Image (spheres, helix red, strand yellow):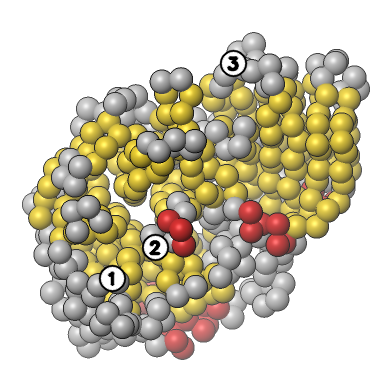
Amino acid sequence: MRYLLYLFLVIGICCKNTETNSNTSIQTTLSEDQNYDQPYRPQFHFSPPSKWMNDPNGLVYHQGIYHLFYQYYPDDIVWGPMHWGHAVSKDLIKWEHKPIALYPDDLGYIFSGSAVVDLENTSGFGTKENPPLVAIYTYHSIEGEKSGRLDFQTQGIAYSLDNGDRWEKYEGNPVIGNTNIKDFRDPKVAWDQESAQWIMTLVAGDHAKFYSSKDLKSWELLSEFGKNEGAHGGVWECPDLFELQVVGSKEIKHVLLISINPGAPNGGSGTQYFLGDFDGKQFTTDHTEAKWIDWGRDNYAGVTYNNTPEDERIFIGWMSNWDYAQKTPTEVWRSAMTLPRTMSLHQEGNSYFLKSYPLDAISSISSEALVHDAIQLSAPFNISNDSLSTSDIKFQANLSEALEVTLGNDLGESAVFSIAPKQEELQFDRRKSGRISFEERFAGDLQTQPYKPKNELAEVRIIVDASSIEIFVEGGRYIFTNQFFPEKPYNQLLISGEENATLKNFSIHTLTSIWKHE
């Protein structure tokens, strides 16, 4: 039946360029299993009401609302004909589901892209008094792909005059055609104030392309970047280009995010970044090695918000990995997003690095459960608490001392984070975390990332939500994001370390569900 429904949606579109979606078209989807009580269901991370979700798309702030669009297949819990799902939030913590924003049409599926507020109405779609939201996305022609053509991905646009509730596709789509490039997708667009033009960053297999436009309709190729820079273990995807000021300095650098699949440092999908300069035409970088935004296995395709208040750079990623994304053991829905994170740029000596850290707004769903000024680790510290499966654990530890933090249950299942200064590694182990047999690459090897041991205290923050863990060390300089699927929720915390080690400012906060109001 779902395939007949999809066929009806595609064939029944009377005009590909003026499709407007009614609010009733997703009510069946939204009414399914809204209690969010299924096994492994995240309670404060965004997940779709049901069915398949992957990349975040069209992250934009407008008129007090943060929009989250996302790759969505409303008919199954595996990847299928891509739509843009839609949700909104006033604080990036509590989300409201909205009707599907963009449906496939005869130009193809609706793949990943971005959205902007066209404040000066350069596109002519709205007025200066009522500037349009404009979505820029990739069309993927499944017929073209199956026939063996290479030009099956093109770029299209759509606009909304009511802050994202209804969308009209541009009658002149596609706005960028294809010259036989197999992987040609994921446009991220932003306004460049200095050159007074729109800049699009697009990926083409093994490199990025930069385009410019005055009106979001006509685009000119400016330059390319990346054939000889960074990691190339897989296809480049989901780019993002933006400026950040170095904390404690007046220096400004451009940041270029590039997701890659496969080729991440711990296997499968991951996101690298480059630091450098974009002069309005060309991006240049002072490093050729890959830098990684997250060393866990479940943070992919992440991009940042456009048009945020005070130009805050806020990042959201898809919390999964293409090695096993379609096989994870959920039944009603599949996959979630990372917590929104504020990004910042820092300098140490001659090197620069990104930090990303959860928004302060998460405190709105936090309740205090346990606080210790200091914990001596002459003996392991052990807690049993059913609220650990939705918790925010924080403490300060000396990064020159070995430490092991274990989340577990009475079945012997566990997920383990370790500080290993002798190896100069941070480690995460989910090989005994619970259900792992659904895909042999899920458990994988011991996950590691290099770090610099310092004889000083640094914050360790561990956020757990049913089937995920996000670990931030030194304010988000070092990050692991991972899924796990225990047979019973984790309700035990065990911390062990060197005999004279002391944890400072230890706290555990229970985080309440954002869905119980529905």
SS for dot 1: loop
Check the image and name the residue furthest to the right.
Answer: 379
Is residue 247 placed above or below 102 in the rendered structure? above
Check disc 2 and report the residue beneath it: 307
Whether residue 468 appears in this view of the structure is yes
Residue at (54% x, 50% y) in the render: 341
- On the image, the x and y values in percent for residue 61 come to 44, 67
Residue at (40% x, 43% y) in the render: 244
Q: Amino acid at mark 3?
A: Glu
Q: Amino acid at mark 1?
A: Asp
For the residues labelled 1 and 3, the Cα–Cα distance comes to 47 Å
Q: Quadrant of residue 91?
A: bottom right
Q: Count residues near mark 3 (Cα–Cα under 10 Å), then give few for <14, some for 14-19, many for 20+.
A: some
Residue at (90% x, 19% y) in the render: 378
For the residues labelled 1 and 2, the Cα–Cα distance comes to 10 Å
Contact (CB < 8 A) between labels 3 and 2? no
- Does 98 sit left or right of 168 as displayed? right
Q: Amino acid at mark 2?
A: Asn
Q: Nearer the viewer, residue 252 or 79?
A: 252
Is residue 324 placed above or below 395 in the rendered structure? below
The label on residue 490 is: none
Q: Earlier in the sequence, mark 1 or mark 2?
A: 1
SS for dot 3: loop
Whether residue 260 appears in this view of the structure is no
- On the image, the x and y values in percent for residue 291 come to 41, 30
The label on residue 424 is: 3
Q: Count residues near mark 2 (Cα–Cα under 10 Å), then give few for <14, some for 14-19, many for 20+.
A: many
- On the image, the x and y values in percent for residue 142 come to 24, 62
